Amino acid sequence: WTYGRDNTVAFANELAPGSCRPWVALERRELTVAGNARHRFRIEITVPADAPVGECRFAVMLEGLDSYKAEAGGISLPVTGRIGVIFYLTVGDGKPQLSVVAQRPEQRNQANAPLMLDVRNAGNATGRLDGVLSGTDAAGQRLDFAPANGPILPGETRSIALTPLAEPGKAAPTWRLPITLRGTLDVGTQRLPLELAFTP
């Protein structure tokens, strides 16, 4: 599978170069489960002794054999359900190495402009940002922001949005640029100290 710039996932049946799919064994390829029933399904991964250090990613696809006919406005269409369960397998000492290479408001000179981080992963495993950054806006208002938790794959630079945190039961705060944020984000066991300035 591939992860697009628009944060969509595309699945392919063809075996990609360097794929770890040959390492994966399924309990069975077909299974019948009654409505509202549960079934424990076994997946086995055998990593070769000479596998390179890093990360291997694959997906297990679950789909029904029969389609359902959805009818609306006199039109009948066959619909089938499909679920992709994504696996990230770390081999050896594989780990992400994230750094912020740029920061910017998504729109200039606009109140509540979404704040964006361009994050580079120079490591050999997928990483995600976690934590809270605190700071003040142009009016001196204190604000906390949290990064989106999307995956940043090895060798990629991806734009990650910062979202303001609201107090329970209250609307999200409004703010105006410039705004400064500082704090430490977590990437697994890695700590990423940041001091950021967003200007109009």
Image: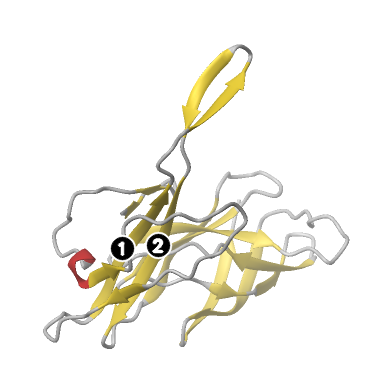
Mark 1 vs mark 2, CA separation in Å: 6 Å
Q: How many marks?
A: 2
Give the residue displayed 56% in from the left and 14% down from the top.
Answer: 75
- Residue 197 or 15: which is nearer the viewer? 15
| Residue tagged 1 | 58
> Which of the two labelled residues, at mark 1 and mark 2, occupies the earlier sequence position?
1
Which quarter of the image is occupied by the N terminus?
bottom left
103 left or right of 177 in image: left
Give the residue type that dot 2 points to.
Ile
Does residue 130 sit above or below 109 in this rendering?
Answer: below
Give the residue displayed 43% in from the left and 69% down from the top.
Answer: 41
Residue 162 image label: none
| Residue tagged 2 | 86
32 left or right of 75 in image: left
Q: Position of residue 58 (x, y in %)?
A: 31, 63
> Where is residue 49, by image quadrant?
bottom left
- Residue 171 or 180: which is nearer the viewer? 171
Few, some or many residues within 10 Å of mark 1 (<14, 14–19, 20+): some
Give the residue type that dot 1 points to.
Phe
Q: Position of residue 70 (x, y in %)?
A: 57, 26
Few, some or many residues within 10 Å of mark 2 (<14, 14–19, 20+): few
Give the residue displayed 79% in from the left and 60% down from the top.
Answer: 139
> Does dot 2 land on a helix, a strand or a loop?
strand
> Does dot 1 land on a helix, a strand or a loop?
strand
For this orientation, the residue located farthest to the left is 50
Check if mark 1's residue and mark 2's residue have beta carbons within 8 Å: yes
Q: Taking the image as drawn, is residue 125 in sight?
A: no
Q: Position of residue 85 (x, y in %)?
A: 42, 60
- Residue 185 or 32: which is nearer the viewer? 32
